[in-house]
């Protein structure tokens, strides 16, 4: 999940040196031996539970009693469940608006940090800091206080004559608040963007300058295409990541997805169904539906990527 | 996929460790015991605010000093998060040894063999009202011992009413009169003090209203005993108040959590359990709060009852049955524990503890209140149906949506009934 799909290209195309088969067998064995601890963990902690959850998604498992097979009931019930549909809507909003904004912020800051100025190391760390603490519970609590009635945000806006009141209790404002929280944590994609920007040869820009290209032209014709594999990678990772938002929504809404269901994210509803309502079979069905949907979206990304992602080895 | 993976892992590990634990078996019927040199440690968990946490820690310290062979490891959270944690632990076979419990969840866990049958261990219940004990029993087995009783009441802050020039209520009121009162407070409160919270959002209040109208909430077969029309009437009671200053807006109330609007000095009244007194006093810093009976359109039938405000239960898988039983016995019977908690858990259910506790000031108000309504009291409710906790929280959530204007009363009734019928079908 954390490996770049784009990185494997070069490795796959690299010629493998011929070797004696016995030697290769020993290497393979050694390789798997070293892999073993991870492999065991992967099978016991990921594959096993996933398979059991697949089975449970076809049952009425309630955490206590033996699960009873009910076929596709959980999956068909989902689409008549208004709260489920609400959670899908809320999550899609978050993904569609939050992810591009976050990436735009990450790219903009990365470009600012990509110039040679004094103290860049400091700024890099400073801009990355929110991401280090961003996922923590404490920051969600701080966020809640900041956006509450008479919190700094409310007071700041009131100063300019905008009286919105607290965002936390207003169903129309909570999504904006959640998106701001994720945008603020742009550090991880920013670092990757920065690394990508450093790979772009400076002579391309010099040549463009000599031809009279302005900053916009340079961005569109050099930065964007040269950076496209990195943009693609970040877009994919951040989209998948956005679908999984849970902790901050849980904290800010006291684990209820309120106010009025406005922060009822998919995973939060899944959790509530499983652990508040004891409907683990139902929750498992939701989990698998999410896996399938995220899988399809990833597939679509890869299919469309051919038209806009350029790798350095490509013909064009 | 971290979140999903994490909890799937928990489920898998839980199932595995549960199987492992049960395979280990138990050597003796009383479980492992400790000595003063080598004490056993039992875990205890409860819900509540800081005030209760402080009192509980005092009680634990006292227990440990009297029982040097047992150490108690305490832990607490707020009410909503409490049940999610218990569910996770139950799935993993790791419920704490002793737990504070609510009637709403007794069936969910008791009927599913997660709780210890306290009839098999030594806990003294001689000092309890015989009518109260069945509320901790399911099908003849005792899963919970009530620590104390509570009853529904209307709280008000006399100082706040006086500052608005409003006379204190005497508690003999119809719903219409109560609404008028809330509206008056709201109108004079000038946007900073509201009448109260929407009292139709609390299941137990609805239950009392049903009793006032001689309707049973649940049938003996575990079905709903009331109709959509009944619920419609109930939610329409405050229809005219929603969105006005008589009721604090949901947007405000949400932001005050985990404190209540009443505890945050935003409202002048609150309709809820009488044992919240200590918590409200601590939260609000008010000098004095008073209690009067809930409104009723039938002056002879207030629909009130004494409920076990909380129960003490033990995990069915505890390795320290003896220590757990002693701790429960201590918490429900010991007079010194009564002195520590006063009425913050409710009025002590055990006569030994009640008689050993001196009630003064506001604690006396709570005790006096329960005495004053004695003639109106009906039987305590049986443990509600399986899944009741969900119904209760859905009730609250739907009323919140109602207050946000996201649902009409008809829509709210449909939403709640759909959830309820679905749930009853699931657990049938």
Image (tube, helix red, strand yellow):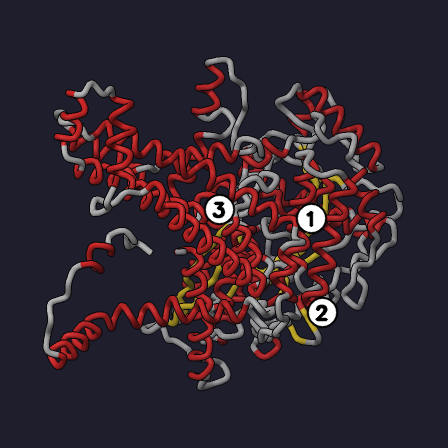
Disc 3: which chain? A
Look at the numbered disc 1 and give the secondary structure of its residue: helix
Q: Residue at x 52, y 61 (%)?
A: B86
Residue underneath mark 2: B428
Q: Position of residue B167 (x, y in %)?
A: 76, 25
Which disc number belongs to residue A250?
Answer: 3
- The residue located at (29%, 40%) in the rendering is A228
Task: Report which residue position mark 1 lands on.
Answer: B395
Name the residue at 41% across, 39% down.
A99
Q: Nearer the viewer, residue B395 or A102?
A: A102
Q: Secondary structure at mark 3?
A: helix
Q: Chain of mark 2?
A: B
Q: Which mark is residue B373?
A: none
Residue B182 locus on image (x, y percent): 74, 29
Foreground of the two, A38 or A136 = A38
User: On the rendered image, what quadrant is the N terminus of chain A found in?
Assistant: bottom left
Question: Marks 3 and 1: same chain?
Answer: no
């Amino acid at each position: 999940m954390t490996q770049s799909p784009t990185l494997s290209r070069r490795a796959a195309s690299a010629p493998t040196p011929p070797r004696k088969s016995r030697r290769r067998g020993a290497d393979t064995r050694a390789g798997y031996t070293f892999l073993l601890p991870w492999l065991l963990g992967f099978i016991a902690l990921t594959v096993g539970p996933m398979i059991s959850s697949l089975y449970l998604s076809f049952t009425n498992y309630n955490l206590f009693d033996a699960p009873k097979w009910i076929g596709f009931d959980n999956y068909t019930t989902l689409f008549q469940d208004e709260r489920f549909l609400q959670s899908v809507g809320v999550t899609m909003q978050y993904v569609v608006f939050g992810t591009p904004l976050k990436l735009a912020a990450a790219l903009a800051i990365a470009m600012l940090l990509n110039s040679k100025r004094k103290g860049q190391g400091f700024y890099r760390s400073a801009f990355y800091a929110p991401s280090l603490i961003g996922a923590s519970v404490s920051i969600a609590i701080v966020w809640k206080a900041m956006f509450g009635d008479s919190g700094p945000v409310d007071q700041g806006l009131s100063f300019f004559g905008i009286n919105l009141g607290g965002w936390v209790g207003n169903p129309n404002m909570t999504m904006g608040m959640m998106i701001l929280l994720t945008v603020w944590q742009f550090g991880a994609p920013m670092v990757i963007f920065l690394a990508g920007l450093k790979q772009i040869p400076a002579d391309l820009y010099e040549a463009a300058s000599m031809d009279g290209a302005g900053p916009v032209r340079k961005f569109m014709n050099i930065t964007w295409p040269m950076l496209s594999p990195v943009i693609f990678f970040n877009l994919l990772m951040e989209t998948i990541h956005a679908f999984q938002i849970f902790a901050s929504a849980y904290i800010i809404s006291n684990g209820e997805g309120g106010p009025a269901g406005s922060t009822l994210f998919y995973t939060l509803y899944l959790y509530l169904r499983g652990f508040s309502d004891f409907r683990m079979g139902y929750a498992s069905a939701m989990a698998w539906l999410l896996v399938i949907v995220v899988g399809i979206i990833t597939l679509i990304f890869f299919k469309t990527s051919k038209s806009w992602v350029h790798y350095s080895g490509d013909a064009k | 996929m971290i979140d999903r993976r994490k909890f799937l892992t928990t489920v898998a590990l839980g199932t595995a460790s549960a199987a492992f634990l049960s395979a280990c078996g138990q050597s003796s019927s009383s479980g492992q015991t400790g000595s003063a040199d080598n004490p056993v440690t039992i875990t205890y968990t409860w819900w509540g605010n800081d005030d209760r946490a402080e009192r509980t820690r005092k009680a634990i310290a006292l227990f440990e000093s009297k029982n040097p062979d047992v150490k108690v490891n305490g832990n607490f959270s707020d009410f909503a998060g409490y049940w999610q944690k218990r569910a996770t632990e139950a799935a993993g076979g790791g419920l704490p040894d002793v737990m504070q419990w609510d009637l709403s969840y007794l069936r969910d866990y008791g009927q599913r063999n997660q709780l210890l049958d306290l009839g098999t261990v030594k806990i003294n219940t001689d000092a309890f009202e015989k009518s109260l004990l069945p509320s901790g029993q399911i099908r003849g087995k005792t899963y919970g011992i009530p620590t104390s009783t509570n009853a529904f009441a209307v709280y008000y802050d006399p100082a706040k009413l006086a500052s608005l020039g409003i006379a204190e209520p005497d508690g003999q009121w119809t719903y219409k009169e109560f609404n008028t009162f809330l509206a008056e407070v709201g109108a004079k409160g000038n946007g900073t003090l509201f009448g109260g919270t929407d009292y139709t959002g609390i299941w137990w209040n609805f239950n009392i209203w049903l009793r006032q109208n001689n309707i049973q909430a649940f049938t003996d077969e575990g079905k709903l005993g009331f109709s959509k029309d009944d619920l419609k009437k109930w939610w329409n009671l405050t229809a005219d108040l929603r969105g006005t200053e008589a009721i604090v807006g949901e947007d405000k109330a949400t932001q005050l959590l985990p404190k209540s609007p009443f505890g945050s000095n935003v409202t002048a009244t609150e309709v809820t359990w009488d044992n919240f007194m200590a918590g409200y006093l601590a939260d609000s810093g008010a000098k004095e709060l008073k209690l009067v009976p809930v409104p009723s359109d039938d002056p002879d039938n207030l629909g009130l009852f004494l409920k076990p405000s909380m129960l003490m239960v033990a995990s069915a898988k505890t390795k320290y049955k003896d220590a757990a039983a002693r701790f429960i016995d201590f918490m429900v019977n010991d007079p010194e524990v009564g002195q520590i908690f006063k009425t913050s858990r409710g009025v002590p259910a055990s006569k030994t503890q009640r008689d050993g506790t001196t009630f003064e000031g506001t604690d006396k108000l709570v005790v006096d209140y329960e005495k004053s309504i004695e003639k109106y009291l009906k039987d305590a409710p049986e443990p509600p149906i399986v899944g009741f906790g969900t119904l209760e929280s859905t009730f609250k959530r739907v009323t919140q949506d109602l207050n946000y204007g996201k649902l009409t009363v008809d829509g709210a009734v449909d939403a709640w009934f759909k959830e309820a019928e679905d749930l009853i079908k699931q657990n049938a």
